[in-house]
Image: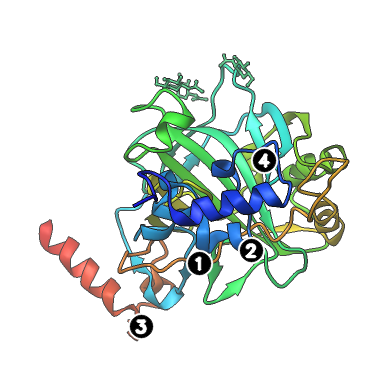
Amino acid sequence: MWVTTGTSLFGILLQLFLHTSGISGVSWEEWWTYDGISGPAFWGLINPEWSLCNKGRRQSPVNLEPNKLLFDPNLRQLHIDKHRVSGSISNTGHSVMFTVDNSTRHHINVTGGPLSYKYQFQEIHVHYGQNDDWGSEHSINGYAFPAEIQVFGFNAQLYSNFSEALHRAQGIVAISLLLQLGDLSNPELRILTDQLDKIRHGGQEVEVKRLSVRGLLPETDYYMTYDGSTTMPACHETVTWIILNKPIYITKQQLHGLRRLMQGDGKHPKAPLGNNFRPPQPLHLRPVRTNIDFNVKQGGKYCPSMYREVYYRANSWKQH
Ligand SMILES: *[C@@H]1O[C@H](CO)[C@@H](O)[C@H](O)[C@H]1NC(C)=O
Ligand SMILES: *[C@@H]1O[C@H](CO)[C@@H](O)[C@H](O)[C@H]1NC(C)=O
Ligand SMILES: *[C@@H]1O[C@H](CO)[C@@H](O)[C@H](O)[C@H]1NC(C)=O
């Protein structure tokens, strides 16, 4: 067979397409998008190292269904250090990304919640829609938000850096903040969106000083958590996802600033950066756990849809 090891027929066809369409300067194996023939449905076929994107059964994002959540009394409060860090914000051509300054001596630690290890904050990704009807990667009961911010850290007890941890067991934590349209922005979010004019095109990067990651988070102790993957190639299944139970707010003007960003450079701006979200992936029987005790919240009455939660409590009670 002429389709040799490590290269799919699809990959070869894509390579031909890229060649004939004059797309150059990128390796086809690195070339992926959020639509068309290099979109999410094809990520796993473009590059053999990304096969989990198609074959994986613990993929992200997912649609979260409140009536299927499993209350877990062992889940603790999530802790994120409060101090401010500097770094840079960039337009990667796939996303808006904040990366912490790698010379920072005071790392932001992320601990508690469902985590068994200490994680170290590394970067933030922004996913958003070109209109208000979609944009977030995670959805709740089928409802998508206009944007989602994902705060990533790596397991600093087991691994020496983010890139190593990406493909290692228990490597990554991702805290997801769902963004809702509002009149008043989260103040830390403004520190990021104030820089958007300077990263209009793919590849642009600008310094950001004194960002409080903790300050981006909504005021809530409640969250949902499940084991999943990164939502971009290579879709490594190493991510503990924590989705906070309250949105933060973004204004129309800030969303407008995001929607003006382009994927390409000044000469070839290509398409807008927005709509950079992967569609929800099947749960395949993975539990989504929560620290929201619906029974307490509903005056001690068992909520019929929380039948599984009742079981879970009974089981943990028996062990004591
Ligand atoms: C920090 O990142 C820069 C640019 O990516 C790199 O040149 C430098 O070696 C890194 N420094 C450390 C301490 O890792
Ligand atoms: C974060 O963890 C590291 C490693 O254990 C520790 O040295 C540092 O002091 C912690 N940072 C804060 C702000 O507690
Ligand atoms: C990350 O750590 C691995 C293993 O220690 C090392 O080989 C690699 O060069 C590091 N990468 C970066 C970007 O520092």
In the image, is residue 116 above or below residue 145? Answer: above
Given residues 124 and 24, the one toward you in this image is 24
Marker disc for residue 97: 4
Foreground of the two, 256 or 293:
256
Q: Which of 233 and 107 is in front in this view?
A: 233
Question: Going from the N terminus, do you reach mark 1 or mark 4 first?
Answer: 4
The residue carrying pointer 2 sits among few (fewer than 14), some (14 to 19) or many (20 or more) residues within 10 Å by Cα, namely few
Q: How is the rendered protein coloured?
A: rainbow
Question: Disc 4 on helix, strand or loop?
Answer: strand
Tell me the distance, in whole angstroms, between the alpha carbons under discs 3 and 1.
23 Å
Instruction: Name the kind of residue labelled 2 in the image.
Output: Gly
- The residue at which mark 1 appears reads as 280
Which quarter of the image is occupied by the C terminus?
A: bottom left
- Could you tell me residue 19's position as x and y percent? 66, 47
Q: In the rendered structure, which disc, 4 or 3, sits on the residue that comes first in sequence?
A: 4
Residue sitting at x 41%, y 33%: 165
Q: Quadrant of residue 119?
A: top left
User: In front of the other: label 4 or label 3?
Assistant: 4
